[in-house]
Image: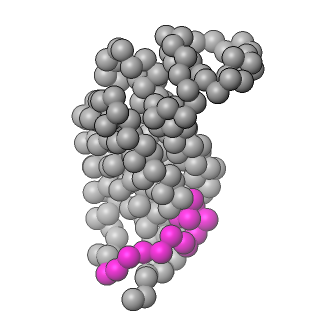
Amino acid sequence: MRITKVYTRKGDDGTTSLGKGERVMKNSFRIIAFGSLDELNSVIGVVLSEKINEKIISTLNITQQLLFHIGGELSVPSEKLNLLKSKDVNQLEEAIDDLNKDLPPLEDFVLPCGSKASAFLHQARAVCRRSERDLVNLDQEEGINPLYIQYINRLSDFLFVAARYSNFCDDIKENLWEK
Protein backbone atom coordinates (compact mmCIF):
# COMPACT_ATOMS: atom_id res chain seq x y z
CA MET A 1 0.00 0.00 0.00
CA ARG A 2 1.33 3.41 -0.92
CA ILE A 3 0.03 6.46 0.91
CA THR A 4 0.15 9.45 -1.42
CA LYS A 5 -2.03 11.84 0.55
CA VAL A 6 -2.45 12.10 4.30
CA TYR A 7 -5.91 13.66 4.24
CA THR A 8 -8.87 12.57 2.14
CA ARG A 9 -11.75 14.32 3.96
CA LYS A 10 -13.69 11.04 3.74
CA GLY A 11 -13.52 10.61 7.52
CA ASP A 12 -15.07 13.97 8.27
CA ASP A 13 -18.43 12.22 8.70
CA GLY A 14 -17.15 10.00 11.54
CA THR A 15 -16.40 7.00 9.35
CA THR A 16 -13.22 5.35 8.14
CA SER A 17 -12.53 2.57 5.70
CA LEU A 18 -11.28 -0.94 6.27
CA GLY A 19 -8.70 -2.60 4.03
CA LYS A 20 -11.20 -3.51 1.30
CA GLY A 21 -12.86 -0.07 1.29
CA GLU A 22 -15.85 -0.87 3.53
CA ARG A 23 -16.86 2.24 5.52
CA VAL A 24 -17.36 1.81 9.28
CA MET A 25 -17.96 4.19 12.16
CA LYS A 26 -14.80 5.37 13.91
CA ASN A 27 -16.24 4.27 17.26
CA SER A 28 -16.84 0.67 16.15
CA PHE A 29 -15.19 -2.05 18.24
CA ARG A 30 -12.88 -2.84 15.32
CA ILE A 31 -11.62 0.75 14.99
CA ILE A 32 -11.30 1.11 18.76
CA ALA A 33 -9.12 -2.03 18.76
CA PHE A 34 -7.02 -0.56 15.90
CA GLY A 35 -6.57 2.65 17.87
CA SER A 36 -5.46 0.85 21.02
CA LEU A 37 -2.95 -1.26 19.08
CA ASP A 38 -1.64 1.86 17.34
CA GLU A 39 -1.25 3.63 20.68
CA LEU A 40 0.50 0.58 22.11
CA ASN A 41 2.90 0.48 19.17
CA SER A 42 3.60 4.20 19.64
CA VAL A 43 4.36 3.79 23.35
CA ILE A 44 6.68 0.90 22.48
CA GLY A 45 8.39 3.32 20.08
CA VAL A 46 8.93 5.68 23.02
CA VAL A 47 10.39 2.79 25.05
CA LEU A 48 12.79 2.02 22.19
CA SER A 49 14.02 5.62 22.24
CA GLU A 50 15.41 4.99 25.73
CA LYS A 51 18.61 3.22 26.73
CA ILE A 52 17.47 -0.34 27.43
CA ASN A 53 18.86 -3.85 27.40
CA GLU A 54 19.40 -5.49 24.00
CA LYS A 55 17.17 -8.46 24.94
CA ILE A 56 14.27 -6.06 25.45
CA ILE A 57 15.05 -4.13 22.26
CA SER A 58 15.11 -7.30 20.19
CA THR A 59 11.73 -8.50 21.44
CA LEU A 60 10.13 -5.07 21.09
CA ASN A 61 11.37 -4.68 17.51
CA ILE A 62 9.67 -7.96 16.62
CA THR A 63 6.59 -6.91 18.59
CA GLN A 64 6.17 -3.70 16.61
CA GLN A 65 6.10 -5.70 13.38
CA LEU A 66 3.60 -8.19 14.82
CA LEU A 67 1.31 -5.41 16.06
CA PHE A 68 1.19 -4.15 12.47
CA HIS A 69 0.38 -7.70 11.34
CA ILE A 70 -2.53 -7.86 13.78
CA GLY A 71 -3.76 -4.46 12.62
CA GLY A 72 -3.47 -5.55 9.01
CA GLU A 73 -5.48 -8.68 9.67
CA LEU A 74 -8.12 -6.70 11.56
CA SER A 75 -8.46 -4.33 8.60
CA VAL A 76 -9.70 -7.15 6.35
CA PRO A 77 -12.16 -9.06 8.56
CA SER A 78 -13.37 -11.26 5.72
CA GLU A 79 -9.91 -12.73 5.11
CA LYS A 80 -7.90 -15.09 7.28
CA LEU A 81 -4.31 -13.98 6.65
CA ASN A 82 -2.86 -15.83 9.66
CA LEU A 83 0.18 -13.56 9.86
CA LEU A 84 0.35 -14.10 13.63
CA LYS A 85 1.44 -17.62 14.57
CA SER A 86 1.42 -19.59 17.82
CA LYS A 87 5.23 -19.57 17.61
CA ASP A 88 5.02 -15.79 18.16
CA VAL A 89 3.24 -16.36 21.49
CA ASN A 90 5.82 -19.04 22.37
CA GLN A 91 8.70 -16.68 21.56
CA LEU A 92 7.23 -14.09 23.93
CA GLU A 93 7.00 -16.72 26.66
CA GLU A 94 10.65 -17.64 26.07
CA ALA A 95 11.63 -13.95 26.26
CA ILE A 96 9.69 -13.59 29.53
CA ASP A 97 11.40 -16.66 31.02
CA ASP A 98 14.81 -15.43 29.86
CA LEU A 99 14.42 -12.05 31.59
CA ASN A 100 12.62 -13.42 34.64
CA LYS A 101 15.31 -15.96 35.52
CA ASP A 102 17.65 -13.16 36.67
CA LEU A 103 15.04 -11.29 38.71
CA PRO A 104 14.37 -11.71 42.42
CA PRO A 105 11.01 -13.35 43.22
CA LEU A 106 8.10 -10.96 43.63
CA GLU A 107 7.19 -10.23 47.23
CA ASP A 108 4.31 -7.86 46.52
CA PHE A 109 2.84 -5.64 43.84
CA VAL A 110 5.41 -3.49 42.05
CA LEU A 111 4.65 0.20 41.66
CA PRO A 112 5.15 1.47 38.10
CA CYS A 113 8.26 3.57 38.55
CA GLY A 114 12.05 3.44 38.55
CA SER A 115 14.11 4.40 35.55
CA LYS A 116 12.54 6.35 32.71
CA ALA A 117 12.69 3.24 30.51
CA SER A 118 10.99 1.15 33.19
CA ALA A 119 8.26 3.76 33.66
CA PHE A 120 7.62 3.79 29.90
CA LEU A 121 7.53 -0.03 29.88
CA HIS A 122 4.89 0.11 32.62
CA GLN A 123 2.95 2.66 30.58
CA ALA A 124 3.16 0.33 27.57
CA ARG A 125 1.91 -2.52 29.79
CA ALA A 126 -1.12 -0.48 30.85
CA VAL A 127 -1.92 0.45 27.24
CA CYS A 128 -1.44 -3.21 26.31
CA ARG A 129 -4.01 -4.25 28.92
CA ARG A 130 -6.49 -1.79 27.42
CA SER A 131 -5.75 -3.14 23.95
CA GLU A 132 -6.52 -6.60 25.26
CA ARG A 133 -9.88 -5.44 26.64
CA ASP A 134 -10.67 -3.79 23.30
CA LEU A 135 -9.81 -6.99 21.42
CA VAL A 136 -12.04 -8.99 23.79
CA ASN A 137 -14.91 -6.57 23.06
CA LEU A 138 -14.33 -7.01 19.33
CA ASP A 139 -14.15 -10.77 19.72
CA GLN A 140 -17.46 -10.85 21.60
CA GLU A 141 -19.06 -8.67 18.93
CA GLU A 142 -17.66 -10.21 15.74
CA GLY A 143 -15.23 -13.00 16.58
CA ILE A 144 -11.51 -12.68 15.87
CA ASN A 145 -8.46 -14.92 15.72
CA PRO A 146 -7.92 -16.07 19.34
CA LEU A 147 -4.16 -15.71 18.87
CA TYR A 148 -4.55 -11.91 18.90
CA ILE A 149 -5.82 -11.97 22.48
CA GLN A 150 -3.27 -14.59 23.54
CA TYR A 151 -0.41 -12.59 22.06
CA ILE A 152 -1.51 -9.29 23.60
CA ASN A 153 -2.08 -10.98 26.97
CA ARG A 154 1.42 -12.43 26.87
CA LEU A 155 2.84 -9.11 25.67
CA SER A 156 1.54 -7.36 28.78
CA ASP A 157 3.34 -10.00 30.86
CA PHE A 158 6.51 -9.40 28.87
CA LEU A 159 6.25 -5.62 29.35
CA PHE A 160 5.84 -6.09 33.11
CA VAL A 161 8.88 -8.35 33.35
CA ALA A 162 10.84 -6.06 31.01
CA ALA A 163 10.07 -3.09 33.29
CA ARG A 164 11.37 -5.03 36.27
CA TYR A 165 14.40 -6.21 34.29
CA SER A 166 15.19 -2.68 33.15
CA ASN A 167 15.31 -1.47 36.75
CA PHE A 168 17.35 -4.54 37.70
CA CYS A 169 19.93 -3.81 34.96
CA ASP A 170 20.12 -0.18 36.08
CA ASP A 171 20.53 -1.29 39.72
CA ILE A 172 17.32 0.50 40.73
CA LYS A 173 15.48 -1.03 43.67
CA GLU A 174 11.86 -1.90 42.99
CA ASN A 175 9.29 0.18 44.77
CA LEU A 176 6.74 -2.23 46.24
CA TRP A 177 3.20 -1.51 47.31
CA GLU A 178 2.96 -1.06 51.08
CA LYS A 179 -0.23 -2.57 52.46
Magenta extent: 107-121
Percent x, y of residue 76 = 43, 17
- Foreground residue among 162 and 3: 3
Closer to us: 102 or 175: 175
Instruction: Tell me what residue is drawn at x 68 percent, y 23 percent.
Output: 13
Name the chief secondary structure element in magenta.
Answer: loop
Q: Is residue 34 visible?
A: no
Q: Is residue 113 magenta?
A: yes
Q: Is residue 80 left or right of residue 5?
A: left
Is residue 22 visible in this depiction of the protein? yes
Q: Nearer the viewer, residue 19 or 57?
A: 19
- Residue 71 vs 60, above or below: the answer is above
In percent of width and height, residue 158 lies at 37, 54
* Residue located 60% across and 57% down the image: 51
Indicate left or right for 11 with 150 as reference.
right
- Closer to the camera in the image, 14 or 172: 14
The relative height of residue 9 versus residue 115 in the rendered view (above or below) is: above
Q: Residue at x 51, y 42 (%)?
A: 36
Residue closest to the far front: 13
Q: Which quadrant of the figure has residue 73?
A: top left
Question: Which residue lies at the image location 58% right of the left edge and 30% below the top edge?
Answer: 26
Residue 50 locus on image (x, y percent): 62, 55
